[in-house]
Image (cartoon, rainbow, N blue to C red):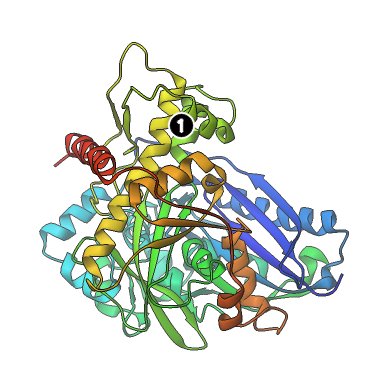
Amino acid sequence: MGKLILAIDQGTTSSRAILFDEARSVVSVGQEEFAQHFPQSGWVEHDPEDIWKSTVNTIQEAIEKAGASPTDIAGAGITNQRETTVVWDRETGEAITNAIVWQDRRTADFCEKLKADGLEPLFTKKTGLLLDPYFSGTKLAWVLNTIPGARQRAQEGKLAFGTVDSFLIWRLTGGKVHATDATNASRTLLYNIIENTWDDALLDQLDIPTSLLPDVRDSNGDYGVIDQDLFGAEIPILGVAGDQQAAAIGQACFKPGMIKSTYGTGCFALYNTGCEPVFSSSRLLTTIAYRLNGETAYALEGSIFVAGASVQWLRDSLGLLDDAANSGAMAKAADPEQEVYLVPAFTGLGAPYWDADARGAMYGLTRNTGPNEFAKAALESVCYQTRDLIEAIRKDISADIELSRIRVDGGMVASDWTMQFLADILDVTVDRPKIYETTAIGAAWLAASQLGLWPDQEQMTNEWSAERTFSPEISEIERDRKYASWLDCVGRTRSR
């Protein structure tokens, strides 16, 4: 079978393990969903043991499905849900409380207080981020301030903090490695993306001890080896990247000016700005796209909290469809005369609004509105939100740079109807890749390229190709009319 590469893809609703061969083809996939916990309104948690067990189970499943031996695996890369915060005991490896998920809004009041104290410009200048509950720093502060004994144990050096990648690395290496990569570190509100180091001034503002923090390494760095006792052989961990940055790598967005948009639970657009960070005037995020061999590339990012989650809501909470995959066909069958808009602010609005207190709403309902119209509104909402991001990016980049193509990935891109509407409302060409598993491909590439098993950046760029391209088909008048109606609905929904 040759040398296999393992991609560990730990997401918001499931964990996956994918084995790739030297031709970058998928050999086998293991996947396992795990429970979401909502202890209070606006709170979202995971049991860290569910994350760990599902990761181990899926790796074992992928190995067994491939009929492979662990010794066939040359290396592993990890990609993960970002910003989700875990704090654990350094001696036992046990988490001291549930993981606080990136969607969680419990620190909204704390963020507002920091803003009222005039601190947002300081955080933005150093981290490229805004003061929002989305990011890890205020989540970590909440744990230290709320969980009994946590602050004292942290000050004594007994606790470790990490995003999900760090927690998995710790467990996979048997507690030998406490590390993260630059992309995940850049999402914490604690990491100076210009100096590439944890920032003492920000740590002081949030009252976070440095002893909690992981070592920050290159995205294609050495993260130790998976303990032999887990799967029967040591497997080097040779790459780590947050899921959206891994998707950009998997889409070969290595050149400045390239953009990708990923459609999963949420939606995230990354625009590569090269070796110089671009700070947004449109409330986008400036983030690290990747750090390879000590060289940092930056990106502008727009983050949408609810994309595929809106379809899950129709399925699981309202019972309007049996399978999320049917949403495209339902949208196609919807009454074209009904213009129903869903603003899916279930956990607030992300970029470019950053309104943590906004809540979801639907507009344009009639007695004839049914499941098909709900499905259409849900899918269209993802596309409208993407246009919000694209408009913001266009404002932030040089006027002479044409943004005419976008690469897409994630589960929702399988819907031709959705991708056509995306092209229509954005007025850009939408390129759908041959392999949808771009996040896993990105994680695998970080490891495989080091081993000489996969191509380098230049060859990856040259070899990338689209499975299908979607071009705009509606008129500019129709496009602008629809988008103006969307903006009106958003304005009615916002909390301020």
The residue closer to the viewer here, 78 or 429, is 429
Residue that sits furthest to the top in the current view = 367
In the image, what residue occupies the spot 58% across and 77% down? 462
Q: How many marks?
A: 1
The C terminus lies in which quarter of the figure?
top left
The residue closer to the viewer here, 41 or 24, is 24
Please say if 75 is above or below 19: below
In the image, what residue occupies the spot 25% across and 59% down? 392
Category of crowding for the residue at label 1, using alpha-carbon neighbours closer than 10 angstroms: few (below 14), some (14–19), many (at least 20): some
The N terminus lies in which quarter of the figure?
bottom right
Q: Is residue 238 visible?
A: no
| Label 1 sits on residue | 313
Q: Is residue 360 visible?
A: yes
The residue closer to the viewer here, 236 or 490, is 490
In the image, what residue occupies the spot 60% across and 43% down? 34
Q: Is residue 250 left or right of residue 236?
A: left
Q: Quadrant of residue 484?
A: top left
Q: Is residue 191 left or right of residue 37?
A: left
The image position of residue 461, as x and y in percent, is 55, 76
**Element class at badge 1:** helix
Please say if 491 is above or below 27: above
The image position of residue 449, as x and y in percent, is 65, 81
Q: Amino acid at mark 1?
A: Trp
